[in-house]
Amino acid sequence: MKRLRVLVLMHESLIPPDSLKGYTESEILEWKTEFDVVSTLRELGHEVLPLGVYDDLGDLRRAFEDFKPHVWFNLLEEFHGVGVYDHHVVSYLELLKQQYTGCNPRGLLLGHDKPLAKKILSFHQIRTPGFFVAPRGKKTRKLAALEFPLLVKSASEDASLGISEASIVYDSASLQERIDFIHRQTKTDALVETFIQGRELYVGLMGNRRVKVLPTWEMLFENARPGSPLIATSRVKWDIKHQEKLGIKTCRAVDIPPKIEAKIEQVCKRAYKALSLSGYARMDLRLRDDGEVFVIEANPNPNLSFGEDFAESAQEIGYSYEQLLQKIITLGLNYQAEWRLV
């Protein structure tokens, strides 16, 4: 394996220490992905430079000139504190004619603009819950075609920010209250969509032109109250004590008929291509009891922590964590950005 100069791009507050010794589990959780990626790439023999940025593109330019990376390993999820600005940073890397891991600018833009992504999916006849957008500063009117219960979330934030059990609403008063909450807390428009009762599934994909679909993963709520809505709230994803209370675990989905598994794979591939994704991504799905598959969200550049869903599903088909990171680098080096075609 060729030794590469790998610049790992991340938020300035997430530069990891050299060792986990002395840190609590909650402290480690903040920068676990960054630690896992940096330490593993070094173990593979690469020359690794972690670069933390916040709002200065000059940091990237200086690192480009001084370090001369073969590839940028992109773990950056925001710029200037704005989540949807990450595609601008990748665009800047392309303007510098740099090779990078993960998704291209167009795919990042479409994946993070949830209403636009849903419109594109609908155009391609890929099932996604019915929806409408409640813009900030404007009066909200529910679409007559949508029936309660509805799910209210941010139109652009990820990581389940602003999502709780109260996000599922059953009447007009609760709907308006939750829309106002999303506007206040996230400072974004609210996305209101039909709540799909069913199994919570995640499917990882890797590839540029040819796409590899990883095994279907499922979130289970082993201690949840019977009849309670099972959704991946912010606390479900990030609160360790809450996870233990609800018996949250993710694992390979079982008891899905082969015909439905084939449908899931086809739907995920079609959505990946429709949204111009590249590198690697995760599809969040709902599988209804009648076998209908709904794409809830597309997540370019999902969590790459060791032991988390994406890495675990890759391991199911023979990719060790080291091999997974090396595969992601190879995909980045082979991505045919427009500047490489001129």
Image: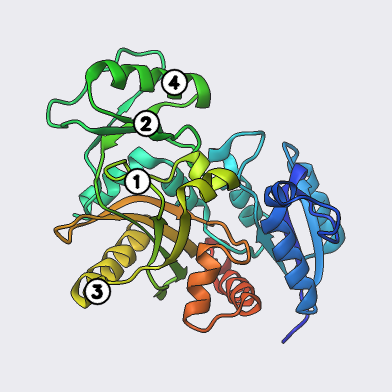
Kind of residue sitting beneath label 1: Leu
Tell me which numbered mark, 3 or 4, is placed earlier along the sequence.
4
Q: Residues within 10 Å of mark 4 (few under 14, many from 20)?
A: some
Residue 130 visible at all: yes
Tell me which numbered mark, 1 or 3, is placed earlier along the sequence.
1
Q: Are marks 2 and 4 in contact (CB under 8 Å)?
A: no
Residue nearest the observer in this picture, 29 or 98:
29
Question: Which residue lies under the disc numbered 2?
Answer: 167
Q: Residues within 10 Å of mark 2 (few under 14, many from 20)?
A: many
- Secondary structure category for the residue under label 2: helix
Residue 262 circle label: 3
Among the 4 quarters of the image, the one containing residue 270: bottom left
Kind of residue sitting beneath label 2: Ser
Mark 1 → mark 4, Cα distance in angstroms? 21 Å
Residue nearest the observer in this picture, 66 or 327:
327
Mark 2 → mark 4, Cα distance in angstroms? 10 Å
Kind of residue sitting beneath label 3: Ala
Residue 67 at x, y percent in the picture: 84, 62
Residue 144 at x, y percent in the picture: 13, 25
